[in-house]
Image (spheres, rainbow, N blue to C red):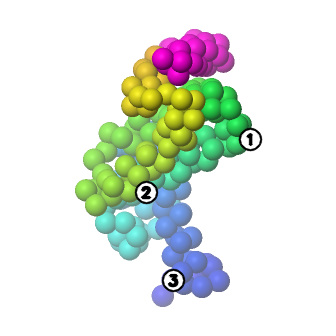
Amino acid sequence: MPKIQAPNLAAHREFRRQQLVSAAMELALADGASAITVAAVAQKAGLSRSSIYEYFSSSADLVADLVVEELDYYLVRLADAIKGAHDPFEKLSLWIAEGLRYVADGRHMLVKSLNTVTTPEYRKEEIALGHRKLIAPLREALVSAGINDVATATAYISSVTDAASIRIESGNDAELEIRNATIFAIAGLRALATH
């Protein structure tokens, strides 16, 4: 029987699960989601292939865990960015800027890579919930700002941030792109709120 490397069995299982997730994350960051195979993750984690199946039904199930963890990480970043802001337009500005900083950091490439893998059907709702949690503070700020058509405003913000993301990825000055995209989006949102 393998030696337990934690105070109890439950803690040991969580340690092993996290060890596998960390190994998969390293592979994804280095070589993309296609590098996440059962054999590669096991080798990276220093465990047997069969040990992966104690925690995950497949490599796609493991990728689903990475997506959920990355969504949680991004949610914390966004929450920290808007913490302490009371004015809805300030919250919107901070939310947009932090989202674009995530792009500038290059971390969003992990999400793009992970999204190329088809996750198991039974994990899709969990991932969709993570996406809804990311958007919730944005939607709340839009409502607080007096914008009636939240869906349209959200689509416009998405268009602006997508354009800025492409410009950042193309090598343009990230802080300048973040500044300009935020100014542009907030001006448009203020105009929507007055009509």
* Front residue of 163 and 174: 163
* Horizontal relation, residue 184 to residue 131: left or right: right
Which mark, by number, is residue 65? 2
Magenta span of residues: 167-195
Q: Between 80 and 55, which is closer to the camera in this rendering?
A: 80
Q: Residues within 10 Å of mark 1 (few under 14, many from 20)?
A: few
Residue appearing at x 68%, y 32% in the figure: 87
Query: x, y percentage for residue 156?
Result: 43, 21
Q: Residue flagged by tag 3: what amino acid is it?
A: Pro
Q: Is residue 181 above or below residue 154?
A: above
Instruction: Work out whether mark 3 precedes mark 1 in sequence or the reverse, and give the earlier one.
Output: 3
Q: In this view, does 19 lie above or below 139?
A: below
Q: Are marks 1 and 2 in contact (CB under 8 Å)?
A: no
Q: Where is residue 56 in the image (x, y as percent from the top left)?
A: 37, 66
Question: Callout 2: helix, strand or loop?
Answer: helix
In the rendered image, which residue does mark 3 sit on?
A: 2
Residue 90 lies in quadrant: top right
Closer-to-camera residue (152/34):
152
Q: On screen, 16 above or below 75?
A: below
Magenta run includes residue 174: yes
Query: What residue would you read off at disc 1?
Result: 84
